[in-house]
Image (cartoon, helix red, strand yellow):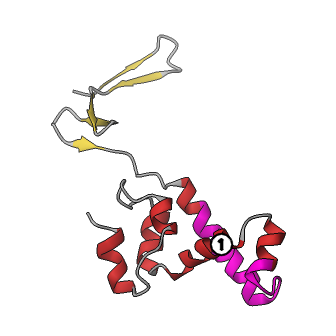
Amino acid sequence: MTRATVSAAGETITVHIPLTFRKRGGRKLVVTPDGAEWAPRPRGDNAMVKALARAFRWRRMLDTGVHGTLEDLARAKDVHATYVSRVLRLTLLAPEIVETILDGRQPAELQLDDLLDGFPLQWHEQRPELLQN
């Protein structure tokens, strides 16, 4: 049962909520008194989010003529051209998958290396391969 107490000076309120913590797959899970599980909003994978942002930024640079070729872009960013092409491939992900990654709802098994290794170009084929739940 939730209860609250007020300090003697009346300036501080302390709320007591009985919670239990359980480990599930290496993560802590909050279990409320009625037995319902609660988890905070999932956090995005920073590496994947940064790679997506980089991919779309680099594509815009190529599209607007800031850099004429992948090699020019790679030289300017001080990375290898093959890395640039692998990152740029992320712009071919289905919008639904990009949104899932940005919201942090992708499966825990999906890693940036999996995306950089390649995926089907057809959007309808990407979901079963990348978002297998």
Which is nearer the eye, 101 or 59? Answer: 59
User: In the current view of this chain or complex, which residue is farthest to the top?
Assistant: 8
The verdict on residue 58 being magenta is yes
Q: Is residue 119 above or below residue 7?
A: below
Residue located beneath label 1 in the image: 82
Crowding near the residue tagged with mark 1, few <14, some 14–19, many ≥20 C-alpha atoms within 10 Å:
few
Count of numbered circles in the view: 1
Image x and y of residue 62, in percent: 74, 85
| Residue stretch in magenta | 50-71
Residue at screen point 33% across, 76% down = 127
7 lies left or right of 72: left
User: In the current view of this chain or complex, which residue is farthest to the left?
Assistant: 34
Image x and y of residue 10, in percent: 50, 18
104 lies left or right of 47: left
Q: Is residue 10 above or below residue 66?
A: above
The answer to which image quadrant residue 51 occupies is bottom right
The verdict on residue 66 being magenta is yes
Magenta part, dominant SS: helix
Query: As shown in the figure, which amino acid type bears the numbered disc 1?
Result: Thr
The N terminus lies in which quarter of the figure?
Answer: top left
Q: Is residue 79 above or below residue 73?
A: above
Determine the secondary structure under disc 1.
helix
Which is nearer the eye, 119 or 44? Answer: 119
